[in-house]
Amino acid sequence: MKEAQIIPLDKFVENALYNENYGYYSKKNPFGKSGDYVTAPNISFLFSEMIAIWIISYWENLQKPKKFNIVELGPGNGDLCKVLIKTFKNFPDFYKNVKIFLYERSKYLQKIQKNKIKEKKVSWLKNINDIKSGPVLFFGNEFFDAIPIKQFKIDKNKIYEKYLSVNKKDKIKIILKKAKKKTIFKLKKFGLFNNKGVIEYPDLGIKELDKMIQVIRKFNGGILLIDYGFLDKKNVSTLQSVKSHKKNEVFENLSDADITSLVNFTLLKDYFLKQNFNLNQVVSQSFFLKRIGILHRAEMLSKKMSFSAKANLYSRLRRLLDSRYMGNLFKVIFAYKNKKKFRLGFN
């Protein structure tokens, strides 16, 4: 960023994360022990297996269309997709009809994915609207939290947006500027003025969802998002940063640390309802995975395992399900256009 340039928070963070020359996701693999954080697919293959079974069940709910598109949003290091494919191959009637797309902005991560996933069924999607036919399921695990947010503050009944600037000594300064009218309209639309502290709005994320909605309106399908977030209202900043599996000051180690925010699932619910989509209740990751049958699957696998392998399996499973870890912090939302109800994992 040029010295003294003043830009909105979301654009500033987007630059730090995705700039093609020096952005965080453009130069390193952040996943796993040697990276900065782990995701559910890195923790246990059971997570990915359960997602695969859920996807196949959704395809059946759609009356087994001859052409079915799956778009993984932000596929990371490709771990989830690799297990999806392995599981799908056990269901040949499904696999012959499916096409898998990976929607990845980072060219660096694309290379990692392409080295790991060598399958004719898989291709990389540059634009969401490149889907030209057939029902489509958009699926994202920790996709939405990685899309930068805008932040606002109300002062004396006036609303201000947070901007950032950098001086000659690389010191970051926060500047509040009067919010634009069209932005204020968006905040009012989702009832965010009730927040007396910090207001957060995922403008870039909503734009991504808008593209998906357009595709689904044409061809049918749905959107499944799993992410860490909240349903109750927050009045504080949820912006956070992590480096080497430890908390990092948000504006320190820029381009070398991940920056995310908690996902407002109440806002997502409102968004999908305004689009006239079918919507199940938002549930915890623990509830969702248990309802799909992850405990039964673990029990089946463990019967043929040694004691140490079994202990490892259940230790990893605990991280996915326990409320002290990912179980309750992570939420699941599914919005879909097809008329026939689909509630697997949500009831």
Image (cartoon, helix red, strand yellow):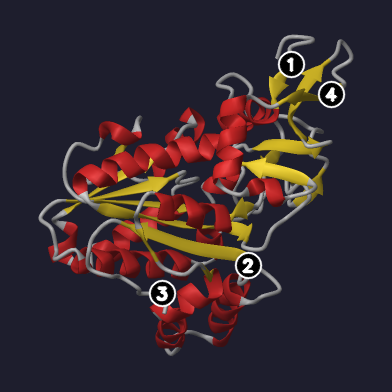
Between the C-alphas of marks 4 and 1, the distance is 10 Å
Q: Earlier in the sequence, mark 2 or mark 1?
A: 1
Q: Nearer the viewer, mark 2 or mark 4?
A: 4
Between the C-alphas of marks 3 and 1, the distance is 45 Å
Q: Is residue 67 left or right of residue 174?
A: left
**Residue on which disc 4 sits:** 172
Residue 281 location (% of width, % of height) = 47, 70
Q: Nearer the viewer, mark 4 or mark 1?
A: 1
Q: Earlier in the sequence, mark 2 or mark 4?
A: 4
**Residue on which disc 2 sits:** 326
Is 116 situated above or below 320? above
**Residue on which disc 3 sits:** 345
Crowdedness of circle 1 by 10 Å Cα count: few (<14), some, many (20+)?
A: some
Per the image, label 2 sits on a secondary structure element best described as: loop
Where is the C terminus found, in terms of image quarters?
A: bottom left
Per the image, label 3 sits on a secondary structure element best described as: loop
Crowdedness of circle 4 by 10 Å Cα count: few (<14), some, many (20+)?
A: some
Q: Earlier in the sequence, mark 4 or mark 1?
A: 1
Q: Earlier in the sequence, mark 3 or mark 1?
A: 1
| Type of the residue with mark 4 | Ile
**Residue on which disc 1 sits:** 6
